[in-house]
Amino acid sequence: MTDRQPLVPAVSHPRILVAAPDNELWNSFLLPQHKQRIATIGEVSWNPLAREWTREELAAQLPGHDVVMTTWSAKRLDAELLAAAPELKLVAHLGGSVADVTSPELYARGIRVITANRAFAQSVADGVIAYIGAAARQIPQYHARVLSEGWRTETYRNSGLLDKRVGLVGFGAIARELVPLLRPFNTTILAYDRYVDAKEMEAYGVRAAGLEEIFSSCDIVSLHLPRTPETHGLIGQELLDLLSDDAIFINTARADVVDEAALNRTLTGRPIRALLDVHHQEPLRADSPLRQAENVILMPHMAGPTIDRRPVCAQIVIEDLERWTRGEALREEIGPRTASRMTQEGHYWQTPQGE
């Protein structure tokens, strides 16, 4: 499976189906000016409902359309739905990962896929910098102490990002956006990714390393792995035990890549500082031991995109849609190999052996 796609002639005035619901969430992405711009590109049909269409409703809407604009809660365009969309040539996805919207059958038909993944990645990378700072300086903890009329103790414990050794577990879009943000702090950056070779990392000024080296030698470990069958539970007790007591552990990826019991034992039993943006059960379970851990900052899965970046997500997708209508190179395209390695919420792609 590769990312090379058969060339499909563009359509200068396509029929566009916007499957995004007409609700508060998706109207924060698609502002009125975006909707007006889409209407100038081609003939547009809109989802008038405040919810996603069911599979049956979507199948009834797809015929005759060249383009479908989807969101992260959209139905997967598998062989059954594709049978109702013989004219479909392009999927314009307003979310980041396309693993749950696309399928091998879709790519086999030569349908192109564009996404807001770059804007999502930029916003999450921005969030990681903020999260590292919050965990290193223990900002929420000291804020709470001051509010309760307390102050720092003589043995207060904080740190910064300057001159630190940072380990990135996963070297996809978010990690690549994060690297230049880390540079001004004079950091040394190591990365692990089974699908990215050392030379590609070197082009970013990053040294490839194994998981053991990252967990045992880095001051800060930040997870950027997608949720796939290969990454489920990859970070277990043996790796977590390698972290020093002064380490900072950040997870803005998916909780399932870490063994939950091992994580709870580590963060409640040692002074490692952590910020977790994602959790095995969301919202976080009421009885989670992490709620009582003073060394852990818990966020409700909101690293990105921040509200102000949602229109940017729509903007870059619309701009690529316009490029497609002009037959120009696409900047936001995701091919089948990349799609199969992105976070998968509802299903797992079956990648043929040897690909």
Image (cartoon, rainbow, N blue to C red):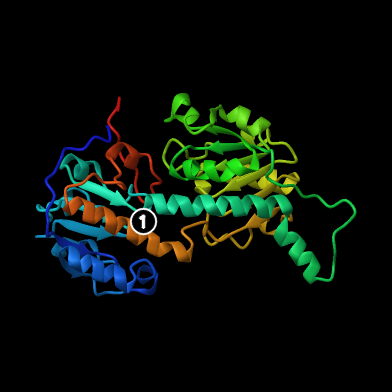
> Neighbour class for label 1 at 10 Å: few (<14), some, many (≥20)?
many
Relative to 219, 257 lies left or right: left
Q: Is residue 294 above or below residue 108?
A: below
Instruction: Residue 328 in the image: state x and y as whole percent.
Output: 20, 46
Relative to 349, 250 lies left or right: right
Q: Residue at x 14, y 64 (%)?
A: 60
Q: Residue at x 51, y 42 (%)?
A: 257
Q: Is residue 149 above or below residue 62?
A: below
Q: Residue at x 67, y 31 (%)?
A: 217
Q: Secondary structure at mark 1?
A: loop
Image quadrant containing the C terminus: top left
Image quadrant containing the N terminus: top left
Instruction: Residue 192 in the image: state x and y as whole percent.
Output: 52, 32
Farthest residue, direction right = 154
Relative to 207, 325 lies left or right: left
Front-most of 330 and 2?
Answer: 330
Instruction: Residue 97 in the image: state x and y as whole percent.
Output: 37, 49
Front-most of 40 and 247?
Answer: 40
Q: Amino acid at mark 1?
A: Gly
Q: Could one spot residue 29 in this view of the protein? A: yes
Tally the marks. Answer: 1
Relative to 91, 234 lies left or right: right
Q: Residue at x 72, y 44 (%)?
A: 272
Q: Could one spot residue 345 in this view of the protein? A: no
Instruction: Residue 108 in the image: state x and y as whole percent.
Output: 18, 39
Front-most of 173 and 352?
Answer: 173
What residue is disc 1 on? 95
